[in-house]
Image: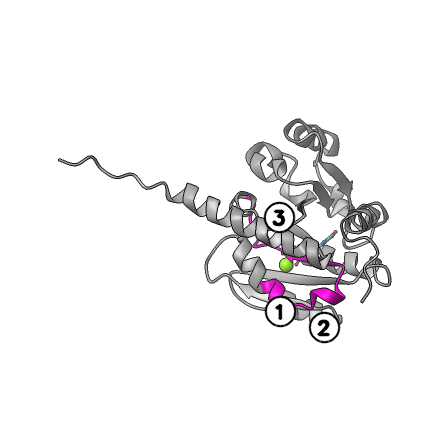
Amino acid sequence: MDPVRLIRIKEDIHADNNAVAEALRRRLSDTKTFLLNIMSAPGSGKTSTILRTIEALRGQLRIGVIEADIESAVDAERLVAQGIAAVQLNTGGFCHLDASMVSRGLEALDLNNLDAVIIENVGNLVCPAEFDTGAIRNAMILSVPEGDDKPLKYPLMFSVCNVLLVNKIDYLTLSDFDLAAMRERVLRLNPAIEIFAVSARTGQGFDAWTEWLHREVRAFTGEKRA
Ligand SMILES: Nc1nc2c(ncn2[C@@H]2O[C@H](COP(=O)(O)OP(=O)(O)O)[C@@H](O)[C@H]2O)c(=O)[nH]1
Ligand SMILES: [Mg+2]
């Protein structure tokens, strides 16, 4: 009897995706467009943070948004209502975005007139961490009500990110969330990660976070003109 053929689908999928992601990064480099991928659990404050970030950088950076959800267009509608260039992707059940889905989203935006695009990835702490979207930087949001133990439970997510926003810091005094313990757990996984404690509700911490983002975008794009 012939030996059973083993096909490693996961490795093939990742190899294909990595090639698309690299091609996408070359295109971003050509058009001088920074791409930030934001990941988090549902409800941690991705859309609220994106809105406040764009508002804080208005007049300094032109930022578009790719929204991703399994269903609905509510997040993109929220952004478009604020005059932001946004496109909604529906993954139809997929729990993450890959680089080809992001490429489709970018086609709907006028990259010549944008310094940066922010991706709001599908809300979960598992699958999005496994797929390179083609982004220049990865960010994640952990909100205070989710608890300070999440780096222990979802180490890959904390390992693949360049920056962590600890959101809903306005809840800190009402909670047993231990910011110092969380920080130590994250730095053990990823010593290079930047951590900002913020509140998308009150705006606390946004100066430091948006300064970091502004610096990263300009390091990539230089002074880009329309
Ligand atoms: N108290 C507080 N609530 C927040 C903050 N950021 C977001 N929220 C609320 O959390 C809920 C989910 O926020 P949303 O931005 O839609 O999260 P997403 O699902 O990650 O996009 C909404 O009711 C927001 O008003 C924050 O910093 N503090
Ligand atoms: Mg959202």
Closer to the N terminus: mark 2 or mark 1?
A: 2
Q: CA distance from mark 1 to mark 3?
A: 24 Å
Figure quadrant of the C terminus: bottom right
Dots 3, 2 in contact, CB < 8 A: no
Q: Is residue 53 visible?
A: yes
Helix, strand or loop for disc 2? loop
> 41 or 55, which lies in front?
55
State yes or no: Cβ of the residue under disc 3 lies below 8 Å from any atom of ligand 1. yes
Name the residue carrying label 3. Answer: 40
Residue 13 pos. (x, y %): 44, 47
Image-based side of 18 in relation to 29, left or right: left
Residue drawn at the location 66% of the way across and 26% of the way down: 188
- In this rendering, the count of numbered labels is 3
Q: CA distance from mark 2 to mark 1?
A: 17 Å
Name the residue carrying label 1. Answer: 108
Query: Could you tell me the amino acid type at mark 1?
Result: Ala
Q: CA distance from mark 3 to mark 2?
A: 23 Å
Query: Could you tell me the amino acid type at mark 2?
Result: Ala
Query: Could you tell me the amino acid type at mark 3?
Result: Ser
Vertical order, 92 against 147 (above or below): below
